[in-house]
């Protein structure tokens, strides 16, 4: 029942993208997001009073960024070595074990290596699984936002009391006229005060 002969070009699997393609999306952006999250966690940490808000926020942000950078880099390394797709969860598990073991060994010896390897593998795989499941919903939400923007260009309205206002051409011309009048009045007052002194 097997087919004899070569597969047509359309049926052949295309090679997975190389490491250098989309590295910002798979390594840099998650690392920056993790650093930002770490800074936020530092803001609400119970240690902020003892160590200072800036120090503890910077420490948490740095640690989260280091962990995320190591994990994402290891995940991409495993993906390239295995020649698999970016959404393969085996990459996440292996990368979690590897990066967790390395960072855990630096932190807490052999027991720390085992403990961190398991934690990184479980948490990293869970986050990647959630990301894979949420990606279609987020992309459809993003598309709906941009479709609404195309239909109604004024979809983002600032409140009346906001100091930032988007002016149309007529309002901009009226504002420039008021500024000219104000400038003329200020320069006239400036001349009068110079003459009086």
Image: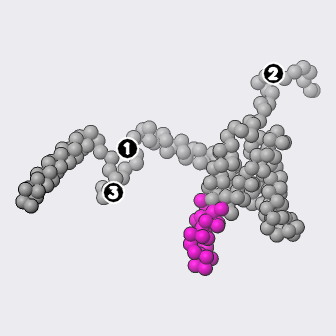
Task: Tell me residue 182's x, y (percent).
Answer: 17, 51
On the picture, is 80 further left or further right than 20? Answer: right
- The answer to whether residue 77 shows anywhere in this view is yes
Q: CA distance from mark 3 to mark 2?
A: 61 Å
Q: CA distance from mark 3 to mark 1?
A: 16 Å
Q: Is residue 59 magenta?
A: yes
Q: Which residues are magenta?
A: 36-62
Residue sitting at 80 percent across and 53 percent down? 95
Q: Main secondary structure of the magenta part?
A: helix
Q: Secondary structure at mark 2?
A: loop
Which residue matches tag 1?
Answer: 154
Mark 1 surroundings within 10 Å by alpha-carbon count, few (fewer than 14), some (14 through 19), many (20 or more): few
| Above or below 3: residue 89 | below
The label nearer to you, 3 versus 2, is 3
Q: Secondary structure at mark 1?
A: loop
Residue sitting at 49 percent across and 41 percent down? 146
On the picture, is 84 further left or further right than 177? Answer: right
- Between disc 3 and disc 2, whose residue precedes? 2
Q: Where, by quadrant of the figure, is residue 37 drawn?
A: bottom right
């Amino acid at each position: 029942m097997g087919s004899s002969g070569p597969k047509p070009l359309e049926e052949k699997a295309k090679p997975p993208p190389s490491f250098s393609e989309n590295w910002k999306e798979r390594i840099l952006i998650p690392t920056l997001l993790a650093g930002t999250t770490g800074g936020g966690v530092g803001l609400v940490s119970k240690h902020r009073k003892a160590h200072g808000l800036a120090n503890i926020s910077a420490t948490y942000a740095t640690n989260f960024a280091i962990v995320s950078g190591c994990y994402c880099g290891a995940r991409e390394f495993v993906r390239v070595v295995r020649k698999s797709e970016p959404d393969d969860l085996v990459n996440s598990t292996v990368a979690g074990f590897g990066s967790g073991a390395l960072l855990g060994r630096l932190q807490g010896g052999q027991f720390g290596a085992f403990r961190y390897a398991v934690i990184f593998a479980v948490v990293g795989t869970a986050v990647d699984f959630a990301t894979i499941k949420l990606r279609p919903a987020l992309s459809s939400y993003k598309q709906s936002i941009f479709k609404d923007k195309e239909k109604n260009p004024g979809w983002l309205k600032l409140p009346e009391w906001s100091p930032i206002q988007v002016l149309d051409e007529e309002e901009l011309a009226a504002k420039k006229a008021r500024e000219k009048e104000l400038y003329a009045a200020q320069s006239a007052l400036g001349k009068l005060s110079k003459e009086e002194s």
